[in-house]
Amino acid sequence: MVQQARAHCPLCTIGAAAAAGGAAWLGVNQGVIGLFIGAFAVSMGWWFSNLIKRQYVKYQRAVLILLSYITTVLPMLNIMEAPLPVFVFIAGNYGSLLNRTYVINLFLLGSLIGAAIVSVTPYLSRKITEARKKTIPFQGMIMTFVLLILSGLIINVVV
């Protein structure tokens, strides 16, 4: 009997890592690289959590996913320093609580967006399947990569 394919399979994980490597090789900005690294880290954590058949700790899946993200992204923060100044002006003088320049690490922001995309895609795929009453082959993987690529294009153009 053929087993059902699951979300966050090794193919998706390797694909996200390859996309991050390809983005770095092509000279894409660090926000996009962070997007794919964050997606890779969460996908890897999800994949490992699916390998463990028994629950040993409460919230085991979430803990493994978070641990995978932290151990993948945090060590790279020293290498991937991509400061993005964001000036917020609402009213009044510069330096007040409402008017400041905030510095955001673009790599970290991208990795959080990539992690969110990989985490939300299985839910979106299920909802689309429920609405259509059938599944497109590799629907979850296609959705994940389309959302990651679109987000990467947006980040690369805007920043």
Image (tube, helix red, strand yellow):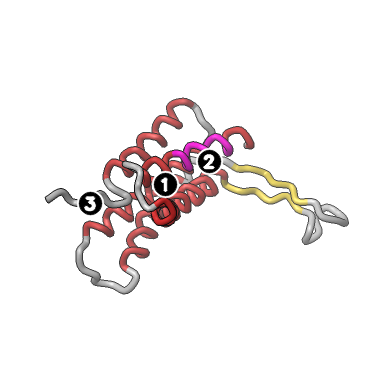
Label 2, secondary structure: give it.
Answer: helix
Image vertical order of residue 97 relative to residue 41, above or below: below
Disc 3 to disc 2, C-alpha distance: 29 Å
Q: Residue furthest front?
A: 133
Q: Residue furthest bottom?
A: 58
Whether the magenta-drawn stretch holds residue 113 is answered as no
Q: Which mark is residue 4?
A: 3
Q: Residue furthest top?
A: 26
Span of residues in magenta = 146-155
Image vertical order of residue 57 relative to residue 3, above or below: below
Whether the magenta-drawn stretch holds residue 149 is answered as yes
What amino acid is at disc 2? Answer: Ser
| Residue at the spot 40% in from the left edge and 35% down from the top edge | 19
| Residue 74 visible in rendering | no
What amino acid is at disc 3? Answer: Gln
Q: Which residue is disc 1 drawn over? A: 39
Residue 51 at x, y percent in the picture: 22, 57
What amino acid is at disc 1? Answer: Ala
In this rendering, which labeled residue sits more in front, label 1 or label 3? Answer: 3
- Disc 1 crowd rating (10 Å Cα; few below 14, some 14-19, many 20+) is many
In the rendered image, the quadrant that contains the C terminus is top right
Whichever of labels 3 and 2 marks the residue nearer the N terminus, that label is 3
Disc 1 to disc 2, C-alpha distance: 12 Å
Q: Residue furthest right?
A: 92
Q: Which residue is disc 2 drawn over? A: 151
